[in-house]
Amino acid sequence: MAKSRGGLSESRSTRFKTQRVQPDPLAAERARVERTLHEAAEMGLLEGKGARISGRVSPALIKQAKRMSGIDSDTKLIEFALAMIALEDEFPRAFAASHGTVDPTLKLGY
């Protein structure tokens, strides 16, 4: 039986309202930032924060980088950007450097 509220009948659907949880559009990016900084920390790249870096960059670049990464702090944004470079996969360079180094007489099975 529906409860009465101020003389009006309240239906079951209005009594048991559920909230929809909206997915966080930056959740994957935040996870990538945290994984990158965690890996950099494990390699000891974030220890002894005594170095200072400065430069002039476009405010639009900073705003977009913060928006895309979910990072609010300038320091953390620079740290993340440097960690991305420092942890970059070397495979593409190694692959390009090996071009033409396989013996052309080697039988590769095809």
Image: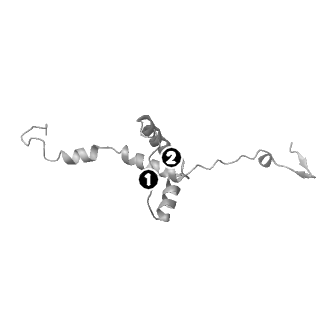
Tally the marks.
2
Q: Residue at x 13, y 43 (%)?
A: 101
- SS type, badge 1: loop
Locate the C terminus by quadrant.
Answer: top left
Question: In this view of the protein, which residue sits in the foreground, 47 or 21?
Answer: 47
Q: Indicate the position of residue 51 as horizontal and vertical percent values.
A: 44, 47
Q: Quadrant of residue 103?
A: top left
Residue at the top extreme, as displayed: 42
Up-down: is 22 above or below 55?
above
- SS type, badge 2: helix
Question: In this view of the protein, which residue sits in the foreground, 3 or 29?
Answer: 29
Q: CA distance from mark 2 to mark 1?
A: 28 Å
Q: Which residue lies under the disc numbered 2?
A: 28
Q: Residues within 10 Å of mark 2 (few under 14, many from 20)?
A: few
Q: Residue at x 35, y 45 (%)?
A: 88
Mark 1: amino acid: Ile
Q: Residue at x 93, y 52 (%)?
A: 7
Question: In this view of the protein, which residue sits in the foreground, 18 or 22?
Answer: 22
Q: Indicate the position of residue 98 as horizontal and vertical percent values.
A: 18, 44
Question: In this view of the protein, which residue sits in the foreground, 12 or 25?
Answer: 25
Q: Quadrant of residue 104?
A: top left
Using the image, tell me which numbered label, if any, was put on residue 107: none
Up-down: is 67 above or below 79?
below
Q: Which residue lies under the disc numbered 1?
A: 53
Q: Indicate the position of residue 26 as horizontal and vertical percent values.
A: 54, 50
Side of 96 relative to 23 (left or right): left
Q: Residues within 10 Å of mark 1 (few under 14, many from 20)?
A: few
Side of 34 relative to 86 (left or right): right
